[in-house]
């Protein structure tokens, strides 16, 4: 099941990945749900995984830190620093995974129309190589067609 | 094996994979190998680089597990290995899926938060 859900993944430029998702709620609520730990803990992480650490210092220069613990005991940590805060329409922060190289700049934009919010998260990677590696790693298409396409992209990048 | 030690090994492998891919010569070598195995001499031919320099790049790719050596003892042909890339695949795809599942939960939460006042006209 790839891209059959409502989360859309596209690549607007060489170094970016764009996530788009519509929520049936006003943007101030969506914004809060993504920045208030007491709300974040109620939705972020599922299938038995839980947000064991959720720290948010919502001010420019403030840090955020999430740690998800999976049922098998493994943990996945993410962290970042807020760069720009304009509730409820825009939020910019750095974002990196403890177990994955490269720091992305995440620009979250919340556009409200008739009580519904179109949420976009533009992830800007430090280089095309890292972004391509992420994409070629199957973010959109899965492992199946991986190798041929990888060869193509590698050839273009080289 | 402890989950934690497995995790850090997997993380190290991912680091090695991405570090190995972050170089144009190594990407060119991988692209060449993706179309079939080749010896160091064959690999070096299109480059304005010594075989020693090419060997160095190949070593980085080998350490990352992206390239292995074939059986032929004379040619020592190199070939690509899919496993490290599959691991990267698995990791990011599971991230995307978990994000989508999280968003479904967020849908439910947003619905919950709005229930008492959902039908009220919004003042804007």
Image (cartoon, grey):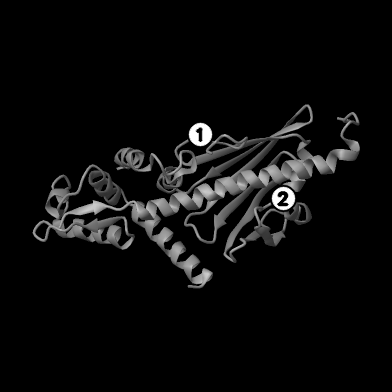
Q: Position of residue B51 (x, y in %)?
A: 14, 56
Picture residue at 52% right of the left edge, 38% below the top: A2
SS of the residue at dot 1? loop
Q: Is residue B118 left or right of residue A55?
A: right
Q: How many marks?
A: 2
What secondary structure is found at the residue carrying circle 2? helix
Q: Quadrant of residue A112?
A: top right
User: Mark number for residue A43?
Assistant: 2
Above or below: residue A67 compared with residue B124: below
**In terms of depth relative to the viewer, which is nearer, A158 or B3?**
B3
Considering the image in quadrants, where does the C terminus of chain A appear?
top left
Q: Are marks 2 and 1 on the same chain?
A: yes
Say which label, 2 or 1, has the lower sequence index: 1
- Label 1 marks which chain's residue? A
Pointer 1 local density, CA inside 10 Å: few below 14, some 14–19, many at least 20? few
Q: Position of residue A14 (x, y in %)?
A: 44, 38
How packed is label 2: few (under 14 Cα within 10 Å), some, or many (20 or more)? many
Residue A87 visible here:
no
- Mark 2 belongs to which subunit? A
Residue wearing tag 1? A12
Residue projecting furthest to the left: B74
Looking at the image, the residue that sits furthest to the top is A114
Q: Is residue A99 above or below residue A143?
A: below
How far apart marks 2 and 1 lie (CA) works out to 28 Å
Query: Taking B11 as reference, is A31 above or below it?
Result: above
Can you see residue A51? yes
Q: Is residue B53 left or right of residue B63?
A: left
What percent of the width, then of the height, locates residue B108? 76, 42
| Residue at the spot 16% in from the left edge and 58% down from the top edge | B71
The percent coordinates of residue B53 (x first, y second) are 19, 58
Above or below for B22 versus B3: above
At x 51%, y 61%, the residue is A99
């Amino acid at each position: 099941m790839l891209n059959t859900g409502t989360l859309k993944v596209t690549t607007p430029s060489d170094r970016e990945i764009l996530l788009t998702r519509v929520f049936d709620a006003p943007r101030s609520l969506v914004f809060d749900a993504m920045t208030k730990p007491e709300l974040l803990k109620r939705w972020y992480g599922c299938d038995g995984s839980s947000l064991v650490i959720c720290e948010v210092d919502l001010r420019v220069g403030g840090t955020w830190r999430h740690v998800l613990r999976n049922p098998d005991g493994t943990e996945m940590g993410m962290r970042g620093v807020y760069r720009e805060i304009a509730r409820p329409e825009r939020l910019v922060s750095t974002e990196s995974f403890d177990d994955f190289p490269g720091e992305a700049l995440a620009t979250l934009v919340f556009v409200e129309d008739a009580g519904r919010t179109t949420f976009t998260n533009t992830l800007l990677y430090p280089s095309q190589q890292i972004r391509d590696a992420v994409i070629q790693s199957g973010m959109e298409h899965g492992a199946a067609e991986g190798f041929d396409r990888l060869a193509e992209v590698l050839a273009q990048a080289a | 094996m402890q989950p934690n030690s497995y995790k850090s090994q997997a993380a190290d492998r991912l680091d090695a994979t991405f570090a190995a891919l972050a170089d144009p010569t190594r990407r060119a070598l991988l692209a060449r190998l993706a179309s079939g195995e080749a010896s160091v001499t064959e690999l070096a031919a299109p480059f304005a680089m010594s075989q020693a320099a090419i060997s160095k790049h190949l070593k980085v790719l080998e350490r990352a597990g992206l390239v292995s050596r074939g059986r032929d003892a004379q040619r020592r042909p190199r070939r690509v290995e899919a496993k490290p890339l599959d691991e990267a695949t698995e990791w990011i795809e599971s991230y995307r899926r978990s994000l989508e599942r999280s968003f479904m939960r967020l849908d439910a939460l947003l619905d919950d938060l709005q229930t008492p006042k959902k039908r009220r006209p919004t003042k804007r």
